[in-house]
Amino acid sequence: MTDDDSGQTGTSERNDRLVNALLDGEHRALARAITRIENREPGYRDLVSRLYEHAGSARVVGITGSPGAGKSTLVDKLAAAYRERGETVGVIAVDPSSPFSGGAVLGDRIRMGSTVGDMDVFVRSMSARGRLGGVSTATTDAITALDAFGKDVVVVETVGAGQSEVDVVRTADTVAVLVQPGSGDDVQMLKAGILEIGDVFVVNKADMDGIERTVAELTEMIHRRSDGQSHADPDEPAVNDASWQPPVVETVATAGTGIDDLLAALDDHAAYLTRSAEGERRELDRIAEELRRLVRNDGNELLEAEIRRRGGIETLARRVRDGETDPYAVAESILEPLRDCLGPGETATEAEGSAPERE
């Protein structure tokens, strides 16, 4: 047995023990599994693959919105409400990445105190790792671990980073978007594109001035979105068996006010996904996006390795600058070995070239 074989065998055995302990309900095993996943330790892919077959039953709720809207406090109260119903909860709080360590800046959320000591609520802070949308591939894999562990509900709270928050929709069954009264920035954020991903809208801090105006603006924007969808091309196949009108829920998270209404809205959307074709469509879209992301990540790593083998990107850039070659020729030479391995196929350039000319 070679050293490599020995290392692979050792990793496989460690994964065996870790998966068995996790499936037996050991929280320390769950924490270690997520740490391996987040740090991308050797063997983490095998670990996620083993957990994947045990996942698929948890409901995933995404909570997003601009900084200061009260997401952490709301998630804390929401987790407590789920526990009162007897459901187990996993919380992933995606924090900004530290510029020094790459880890989560805020660490475990001190504002999530309502469920401290409750072993059926597992809270984990994770780093966004430079992803503007706040949800990295590691977060998706951590959801798989929590799901396999047996959590009934997984809540993902994302970093507030504007329109790029659309990444959350790729991991969640239901997305709740938070705004606060009197914030013109929040309304502009919604107009910029966040509106399209919201299944439920939450006006938090509803005891502040300006609540009526904010609710009215949100309601009007939602109606406009619904009207736009209803005027879609009638020749296109229907995506949903029924339409979903996103509700606007008012909450005061610090006091726990409106949490029951929010829970009911989330339940209603889950029921809608079950009875309509939208649930299956979202699941397929989510899996497809995960496949694309994994292929892109691995492909980029292979290409970076090829660039290093050719002397590094600076060496190639100097050759272009000195007139020895051009960017297209360099790119073609780097991709050529990959094309040779994959076999013939139409590229984007070839597809563009085959397009019919305009008269």
Image (cartoon, rainbow, N blue to C red):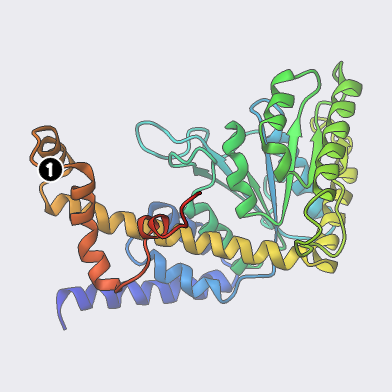
- The reply to whether residue 161 is visible in this rendering is yes
Q: Which amino acid does label 1 sit on?
A: Thr
Quarter of the figure with the N terminus: bottom left
**Residue 341, image x, y percentages:** 25, 72
The residue closer to the viewer here, 53 or 256, is 53
Q: Nearer the viewer, residue 310 or 99?
A: 310
Q: Residue at x 41, y 55 (%)?
A: 352
Residue 276 location in percent, x, y?
Answer: 83, 66
Identify the residue shown where x is 87% and y is 61%. Answer: 242
Query: Residue 141 placed where, x, y %?
Result: 51, 60
**Residue drawn at (22%, 77%) of the image:** 6
Question: Which residue of the protein is positioned furthest toward the top in this rendering?
Answer: 209
Give the crowd class for mark 1: few <14, some 14-19, many >=20 residues within 10 Å: some
The residue closer to the viewer here, 345 or 47, is 345
- Figure disc tally: 1
- Please tell me which residue is depicted at 40% across the width and 64% down the height of the picture: 44
Residue 178 sits above or below residue 231 on the image: above
Q: In this view, does 256 lie to the left or right of 139?
A: right
In the image, is 259 to the left or to the right of 350?
right
Task: From the viewer's perspective, tell me whether residue 160 is left or right of residue 153.
Answer: left
* In front of the other: 241 or 122: 241
Residue 5, compared with residue 175, is above or below; it is below
Q: In this view, does 306 lie above or below 68?
A: below
The image quarter in which residue 223 lies? top right
Residue 28 lies left or right of residue 317; in this view the side is right
Disc 1 secondary structure class: loop
Which residue was labeled with disc 1? 325
Residue 56 lies in quadrant:
bottom right
Task: Give how far across and how far down residue 2 sits, in percent.
Answer: 15, 79
Position of 311 relative to 45 (above/below): above
